[in-house]
Image (cartoon, helix red, strand yellow):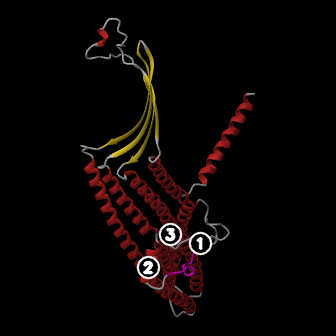
Amino acid sequence: MFRLALTLGLVVTAAFAAAEEMEWVNVSDFKLRLGQDKVLQDLARTELRLTQAQLFPKVTAGTDWVIDGKTEYSPDITQVPNSSYATKDPSSVGLEVSWRLFDGLKNLNDINAAREKVAATVEASLDTRQKLLVERAEKMLALTRDRTILASSKRAVVRQQDALNISRQMLTDGLMTQSDVAIAASELENLRALNEQASRQLANSELAFEKFNGFRAPAKLDVAAAKLKLPASATDAADRAMANSPLPKMAAHLQTAADFSVESARGAFFPTIDLVGKYTRTFDPTPAVKTVNNYALLLRMRLPIFDATLQPNLDRARAEALQKSYDRQDTVLSVTTGARKYFNDYKSLRSQVGRLEARVKEAAKAQTAMQEEMKAGLHTVLDLIQTQRNLISAEQSLADARYLRDMSAFNLLGTMGDLDDGSFDGGTQKMF
């Protein structure tokens, strides 16, 4: 019986552990950051509901129980013979309904400010999504680059192995020295070490991809920037950024919200007018009277005569509004400048990639020719090693340049707010 209970306990524990593990496996940076933005939107909408709720009447029920007290009269009528007046404060229960009729438009300005903040959180979420898409592109492009570099490194190892075999054969034929063979073997070990380094870098890129996306990287990734619709000029990039980027819109909403907050703080100097309905029942006011019911409809006005916090609140609201104005100007400048910069980077890197592609072709031809000429005794193994180094350097420089070119394109589209779900293709794995 004890063994059965222990077995069942282990099964249940394993089930809970598996469920917990599956829950954490599905968590990714992408989902977490989108979830955080959703929380911020919910908070802003809740703040809007709170300000709107101020428009509704407030109903209050309350009661007072007298523990001890005394009612004093002047003249003291309780000393009259056969007096029936009480000497204790009576207990009471009541209901009050109050409705704010006027508050210097403070609440309406608070509502407008809250609406602008909700709109700002929506734009902020759109901007976060653009940044996440850019980061997703960075993870995919880094993975593609590291795969390319590893493949280039493996090809270099194969070529150097062939060169070592050739040098050994030429040593046997008396056409190569022992030192040349040793140099070829040393270069092979060096390339194998570089191959291990490239493998480690690729493993780290795969781990970063999985952490960000929540699933393993597919075998095929298609993120070529050439398929994306890019602007024709730097001016076009800046114009599209101003039209589509969420950042200027978010800054505009925050500035408008700050302006409404200034009006709200100014409204605190005005009087408030409330319509109040009251019902109160007082128990045992005198030995002769058991209860007294009071009904009243009141128009209550309050005018602030002295409140040391009103002016500082207004000054703070004005300062924050001015800061939001500066933030908006800074955002516009940053977005337009960033769009121009990324366009210029893409244009320059695109030309650089073209030159590196030509370099790789020429380096490959030189390596093939050098290998044949070495067999004929026209060159030494050192000449072949140098041409092979040139080739792997050209291939890896091309992989880096393609990464930088495509990243500049995705940064440009992210700055313009033009990235969407169709910008990526993860092969059989849906990226969204």
Foreground disc of the pair 3, 2: 2
Which circle, 2 or 1, is nearer the viewer?
2
Q: Is residue 374 above or below residue 286?
A: below
Q: Position of residue 9 (x, y in %)?
A: 69, 35
The amino acid type, in three-letter code, at marker 1 is: Phe
**Residue that mark 3 sits on:** 134
- In this rendering, would 155 be left or right of 272? right
In x, y percent, where is residue 419? 53, 72
Of label 1 and label 3, which has the lower sequence position? Answer: 3
| Nearer-the-camera pick, 299 or 207 | 299
**Label 3 is placed on what type of residue?**
Val
Provide the secondary structure element on which disc 2 rests: helix
Residue range of the region highlighted in magenta in the rendering: 222-230
Residue hosting label 1: 424
Work out how far the residue at label 1 is from the one at label 3, CA to CA, in angstroms.
11 Å
In the picture of the structure, the residue carrying the numbered disc 2 is: 239
